[in-house]
Amino acid sequence: KRRVLIIGAGQAAVQAAVSLRTEGFDDEIVVLGDEGRLPYQRPPLSKAYLSDGREDILALRPSGFWEKSHISIEPDRPIIAVDRMEREVIDSKDKRLSFTHLIFATGARARTLALPGGDLHGVLSLRTVADATRLRTMLDCHKRIVAIGAGFVGMETAAALAGLGHQVTVVEAGERCLGRAVSGITSETLADGLRQRGVDLRLSAQIERIVGSEGIVFGVQLRDGPIIPADIVLIATGAQPNDQLAAACGLDTTIGICVDSHLRTSDDGIFAIGDCASFDCPREGRNLRLESVQNASDHGRSVALSILGRPVPHDRRPWFWSDQGMCKLQIAGLALPHDDTHTVLSGGKIAAFRFRRERLIAVETVNDPAEHIKARKILAAGPGPTYDDLKAAGFSLGGLA
Ligand code: FAD
């Protein structure tokens, strides 16, 4: 009898377990989590959850689903080691559990900052529902909040908190927000959106230290600058993969657990998916580690097929979304900062078409869901379309030529 063990009980783990069942795996599936709660989605944590605090809508599946699907779920069973020789995992109570197939779906954790003052009360990061709840409980009255980092979590949280009436500053070391993820025009559009919401966005700003008194934060000291007063400091400088367990049992890791295009590690029978996986992407011709719901879900589907002996190379075009106040960013495809950008602006919407060697590789849209869906379809249809293909498909290309 086979037993698939999944370490981690997040987005990727849930999809892998569900896909194994729906694709016909009828032996044992065990999902092992460490957050002490049933699987939930993270995107609302930096958006709606901050204002509505509704935990019931976070669940990835209704609580009765697991029993009905014959999937064992143990949300409070942290795994501390993997014994590859014996084909067993070891939990924090030193109990062993055997597997025929093992999936690492351990996700990522918020990156910490080695800054003086980082341990003061009022300094926090945002990755889990426990983090978001802690942040919510601090918002009892008007607060001054400084977010360090203008990445997705920093921008989304800033927009949400400003919308709730708090005084928010975002401090970013780079010259623009979301510098690695989107084109210059999209950065500017999102920065404008944030400023219109009342957020003080400071770019190219270096932080010297976080300052406090009697253990409680009261500000952020900029290098060569003033102290920005703060009751709460949010460290939003990105995430790093939870790949320590895999590294400790001798699997290859290089900023993520290395897997091939079928999501297999160098050990046949051990796989890695979602935020923790650095996977070989044939289309890009390089290893990718992505942090998105779509990537985690698609990995879950692909790994199920690999385990069932019907492997299909994981080669899907990524897509992504981020809600930042009134701006809804959607990205179809994957571009690098130096790829060409052609922008079309119309009536408050923008679309940035990203080209590499005259072929479309990605489209970033702000407040234009219809164009995003069209872009996903045309990018999924085959090798990168040219300008003529786009015109024939009815894109509103404006002056783009
Ligand atoms: P996770 O969801 O992180 O799940 C991994 C789980 O494994 C965690 O519960 C972890 O505690 C557990 N674990 C780790 N080690 C062990 C162990 N040893 N034993 C047992 N359990 C373990 N993506 C989007 O596409 N759009 C968005 O708008 C968006 N917004 C986001 C907002 C926030 C605040 C955050 C934090 C993320 C957001 N994301 C968004 C990213 C998205 O949520 C992640 O890419 C996705 O959750 C990844 O799924 P995963 O299963 O790989 O990892």
Image: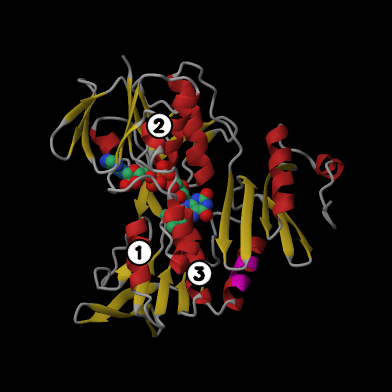
* Residue 190 on the magenta span: yes
Q: Measured from the top left, where is residue 325 in percent x and y?
A: 57, 68
Q: Residues within 10 Å of mark 1 (few under 14, many from 20)?
A: some
Provide the secondary structure element on which disc 2 rests.
helix
Mark 1, mark 2: which one is toward the viewer? 2
Instruction: Give the Cα distance between marks 3 and 1.
Output: 14 Å
Q: Measured from the top left, where is residue 53 in percent x and y?
A: 42, 64
Q: Is residue 49 above or below residue 141?
A: above
Mark 3, mark 2: which one is toward the viewer? 2
The residue under label 2 is: 68
Which amino acid, mark 2? Answer: Lys
Q: Residues within 10 Å of mark 3 (few under 14, many from 20)?
A: many
The residue under label 1 is: 133
Residue 256, numbered label: none
Q: Residue at the spot x=17%, y=40% of the render?
A: 92
Q: Residues within 10 Å of mark 2 (few under 14, many from 20)?
A: few
Q: Is residue 222 above or below residue 72?
A: below
Provide the secondary structure element on which disc 3 rests.
helix
* Residue 277 on the magenta span: no
Q: Is residue 292 left or right of residue 352?
A: left
The residue under label 3 is: 160
Q: Is residue 207 above or below residue 274?
A: below
Instruction: Give the Cα distance between marks 1 and 2.
Output: 30 Å
Q: Residue at the spot x=35%, y=75% of the render?
A: 232
N-term-proximal mark, 3 vs 2: 2
Q: Look at the image and give the residue range highlighted in magenta.
A: 189-193
Residue 252 occupies which quadrant of the picture? top left
